[in-house]
Image (cartoon, helix red, strand yellow):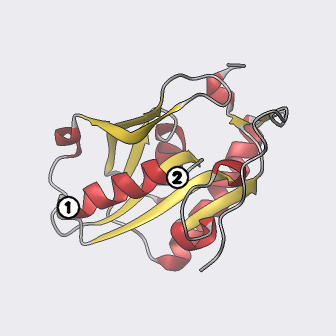
């Protein structure tokens, strides 16, 4: 079993956030699309609100899929860089997902920081009857990774790995 990365010392200055551009996002979505196609097309794409909906819709277009669904799952207490996290993700309105019984589902988020939100939501989709759940993210922030398995073992499709906070173009400069 791989050892998770260690967190920086509490008195150390946090790393400078990396601001991705729309071109960066387009390239990352293309990487994900190629990896998903090689693994087999899903029947439905589920985006985690809010940030995951942008890549979920873009990816669904690249994959030629029309069944795109959303679920709101929140773990950070704010939108700022290095925002505090709650112990467990808060799922809001899971009924918005509709019937997933027997479907092959691709769960998409913009970033996996700790991995907890993605894992929790994937488990929920399985509990709701999805026959297969795969996960895809534009980015993993290894500096915040909390799972026992390394990101590449815990997330099925990752466009890029980073060691700092990521700011996406739809977030502005928060």
Q: Residue 10: x percent and y percent?
A: 75, 36
Q: Residue 22: x percent and y percent?
A: 72, 36
Q: How crowded is mark 2: few (under 14 residues within 10 Å), some or many (20 or more)?
A: many
The reply to whether residue 65 is in sight is no
Q: Residue 140 or 150: which is nearer the viewer?
A: 150
Residue at 66% from the left image edge and 71% from the top image edge: 3
The reply to whether residue 67 is in sight is yes
Question: Is 71 placed left or right of 1 in the picture?
Answer: left
Asked whether the residues under the numbered discs 1 and 2 touch, taking CB atoms below 8 Å apart as contact, a structural biologist would say no
Q: How crowded is mark 1: few (under 14 residues within 10 Å), some or many (20 or more)?
A: few
Would you name the residue on which mark 1 appears? 127
Residue at 41% from the left image edge and 58% from the top image edge: 119
Q: What element carries label 1?
A: helix
Q: Which one is earlier in the sequence, the residue at label 1 or at label 2?
A: 2
Image quadrant in which the N terminus is located:
bottom right
Would you name the residue on which mark 2 appears? 59
**Compared to 115, does 43 lie above or below?**
below
Question: Is 40 placed left or right of 127 in the picture?
Answer: right
Q: Residue 96: x percent and y percent?
A: 21, 38
Residue at 46% from the left image edge and 52% from the top image edge: 116
Image quadrant in which the C terminus is located:
top right
Q: Residue 135: x percent and y percent?
A: 46, 62
Residue at 62% from the left image edge and 27% from the top image edge: 170
**Compared to 5, does 37 lie above or below?**
below
């Amino acid at each position: 079993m791989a050892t998770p990365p260690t967190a920086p010392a509490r008195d150390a200055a946090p790393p400078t956030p990396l601001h991705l551009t729309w071109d960066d996002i387009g390239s990352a979505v293309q990487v994900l699309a190629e990896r998903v196609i090689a693994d087999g097309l899903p029947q439905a794409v589920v985006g985690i609100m809010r940030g995951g909906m942008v890549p979920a819709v873009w990816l669904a277009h690249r994959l030629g899929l029309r069944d795109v669904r959303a679920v709101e799952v929140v773990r950070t207490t704010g939108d700022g860089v290095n925002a505090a996290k709650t112990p467990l993700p808060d799922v809001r309105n899971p009924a918005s997902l509709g019937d997933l019984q027997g479907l092959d589902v691709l769960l998409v988020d913009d970033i996996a920081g700790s991995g907890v939100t993605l894992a929790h939501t994937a488990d929920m989709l399985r509990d709701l009857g999805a026959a297969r759940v795969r996960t895809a993210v534009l980015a993993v922030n290894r500096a915040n990774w909390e799972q026992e398995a390394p990101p590449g073992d815990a997330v099925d499709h990752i466009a890029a790995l980073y060691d700092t906070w990521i700011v996406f173009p739809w977030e502005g400069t928060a």
